[in-house]
Image (cartoon, grey):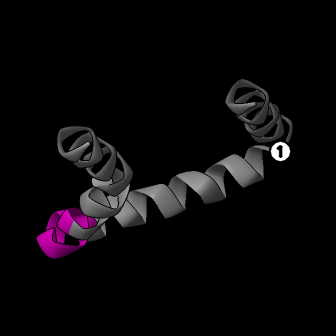
Amino acid sequence: MMRILFGFVLGLLVACPTLAAVLLAIVGSVAVASATYPPLLAAAAGIWAWPRITRRVRGWVA
């Protein structure tokens, strides 16, 4: 499913170069914001890692 979704998004970005430019601008602004404001980067890392952390802890407890 993720491969299909990734292929769809990649095809859309190739078909619409303006959309790719907008996406790159958004990603760039997020990167700059996270570099200038480290708590934002820490919060994003925590949100991304939380499911993995909970699975691992459940494995220890079970």
In the rendered image, residue 38, in percent from the top left (x then y), is placed at 13, 69
In the rendered image, residue 23, in percent from the top left (x then y), is placed at: 61, 55
Q: Which residues are magenta?
A: 34-42
Residue visible at 32% across and 58% down in the picture:
31
Q: Main secondary structure of the magenta part?
A: helix
Residue 42, percent from left and from top: 18, 64
Q: Nearer the viewer, residue 39 or 12?
A: 39
**Left or right of residue 16, residue 55 in this image:** left
Determine which residue is flagged by label 1. 16
**Where is residue 52 shown, x and y percent of the image?**
33, 44
View extreme (right): residue: 15
Question: Label 1 sits on what residue type?
Answer: Cys
Out of 4 and 57, give the one closest to the viewer. Answer: 57
**Quarter of the image that includes the N terminus:** top right
Please state which of residues 61 and 21 is positioned toward the viewer in this rendering.
61
Instruction: Please tell me whether residue 39 is drawn above or below residue 26 in the rendered image.
Output: below
Q: Dot 1: within a 10 Å radius of its alpha carbon, few (fewer than 14), some, or many (20 or more) residues?
A: few
Q: Quadrant of residue 16?
A: top right
Answer left or right for 47 relative to 11. left
Quadrant where the C terminus sits is top left
